[in-house]
Image: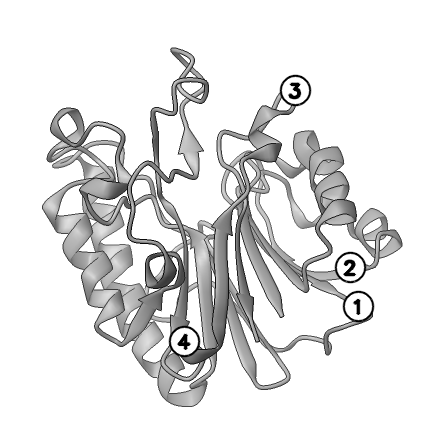
C-alpha cells in the first residue's frame, strides 16, 4: 500500500499535474491540501476517469482537503469525518475516512503567520483540538495514517538555515512541542523512521530561486501508528513535480506500507 500527501496550492491550477503524477505513480491513496475550490467545482469525473474516487471538503479561495483512493485496489470510504469535532472552525482543514481496517486522515494545519500573532494563537488552539481528537481516534482505529501539510519543521535538520529560522513561524518551540506531542500519542514520523539525514525538504518558496538552491523546509509529513510502523518499508519525497511549469510550492511525500 502506498499513500501520498501533496499540498497542490489550487487543484484547479494543478489538476493536470495531479493527473500526470498519478499516471506515473499510481499510489493507492493521494491526500491533497489547499484545494482552493468549492465542492461543486471538485473534478471528481476527471479523477474517476483516471481510476480514482475521492472524499473531499472544499471552500472558496482557501484551504480544502481531499483523499483520493485508487478504485481498483482499495475499498470504499466509510466513517468519513470533516473537520475537528474538538475545535469549532469553518475552515476546511481536516478529512478522515476508513478504508478496510486503516484510518486515513488528511490535514492542512494553519500557517500561523507569525509567532505571537492572532493567527498563531489560532494555530496553537487548533493543534490542541487536534491532539485531543487524534487521541480518541487512535483508540478506535489502531491502524492509522495521518498525513498532510503540517506547517511545522520538526527540528533543525528540516530547515535549510536553522539559525535564520530559529524561533520563526514553522520552527518555533511552541510548534515543535506540539509536533512532539503528536508523536507521544504515539504516532511515528515515517520519513525519520528511515532517514536521519538533513537537506530533505518538501516545500520551497517561489522567491529567490529557493528550489534551485535547495533552500527549503520539510513541513509535509506522514505519521503512522504503532500497529503500522513495523510495516513501513519506504518513505520518500518526490521532487519531480516541483520542476514543472507553474508548480505547487510543495511536492509529494509518499510512504509504502507492506
Q: Residue at x 42, y 88 (%)?
A: 140
Q: CA distance from mark 1 to mark 3?
A: 29 Å
Q: Disc 2 marks which residue?
A: 52
146 or 135: which is nearer to us?
146
Q: Disc 3 marks which residue?
A: 245
Q: CA distance from mark 1 to mark 4?
A: 25 Å
Q: Nearer the viewer, mark 4 or mark 2?
A: 4
Q: Disc 4 marks which residue?
A: 229
In the picture, the disc for residue 71 is: 1
- Badge 3 local density, few (<14 within 10 Å), some, or many (20+)? few
Which of disc 2 and disc 4 is earlier in sequence?
2
Q: Position of residue 233 (x, y in %)?
A: 50, 68
Residue 43 visible in the displayed image: no
Q: Are marks 3 and 4 in contact (CB under 8 Å)?
A: no
Classify the position of the C terminus by image quarter: bottom right
- Badge 2 local density, few (<14 within 10 Å), some, or many (20+)? many
165 or 229: which is nearer to us?
229
Picture layout, residue 116 above or below residue 82 = above
Q: Are marks 1 and 2 in contact (CB under 8 Å)?
A: yes
Picture layout, residue 223 above or below residue 210 = below
Q: Residue at x 62, y 21 (%)?
A: 246
Q: Position of residue 123 (x, y in %)?
A: 26, 48
Q: Is residue 161 left or right of residue 94?
A: left
Amino acid at each position: 500500500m502506498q499513500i501520498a500527501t501533496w499540498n497542490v496550492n489550487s487543484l484547479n491550477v494543478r489538476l493536470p499535474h495531479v493527473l500526470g503524477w498519478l499516471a506515473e505513480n499510481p499510489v493507492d491513496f493521494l491526500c491533497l491540501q489547499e484545494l482552493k475550490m468549492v465542492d461543486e467545482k471538485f473534478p471528481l469525473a476527471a479523477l474517476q476517469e483516471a481510476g480514482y474516487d475521492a472524499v473531499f471538503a472544499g471552500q472558496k479561495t482557501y484551504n480544502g482537503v481531499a483523499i483520493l483512493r485508487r478504485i481498483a485496489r482499495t475499498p470504499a470510504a466509510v466513517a468519513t469525518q470533516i473537520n475537528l469535532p474538538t475545535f469549532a472552525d469553518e475552515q476546511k482543514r481536516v478529512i478522515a475516512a476508513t478504508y478496510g481496517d486503516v484510518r486515513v486522515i488528511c490535514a492542512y494545519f494553519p500557517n500561523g503567520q507569525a509567532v505571537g500573532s492572532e493567527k498563531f494563537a489560532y494555530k496553537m488552539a487548533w493543534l490542541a483540538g487536534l491532539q485531543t481528537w487524534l487521541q480518541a481516534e487512535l483508540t478506535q482505529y489502531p491502524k492509522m495514517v495521518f498525513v498532510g501539510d503540517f506547517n511545522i519543521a520538526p527540528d533543525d535538520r528540516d530547515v535549510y538555515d536553522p539559525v535564520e529560522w530559529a524561533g520563526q513561524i514553522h520552527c518555533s518551540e511552541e510548534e515543535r512541542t506540539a509536533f512532539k506531542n503528536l508523536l507521544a500519542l504515539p504516532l511515528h514520523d515515517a520519513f525519520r523512521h528511515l532517514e536521519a539525514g538533513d537537506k530533505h525538504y518538501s516545500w520551497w518558496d517561489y522567491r529567490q530561486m529557493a528550489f534551485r538552491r535547495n533552500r527549503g523546509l520539510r513541513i509535509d509529513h506522514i505519521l503512522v501508528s504503532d500497529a503500522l510502523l513495523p510495516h513501513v518499508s519506504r518513505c520518500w519525497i518526490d521532487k519531480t513535480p516541483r520542476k514543472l511549469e507553474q508548480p505547487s510550492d510543495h511536492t509529494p511525500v509518499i510512504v509504502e506500507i507492506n
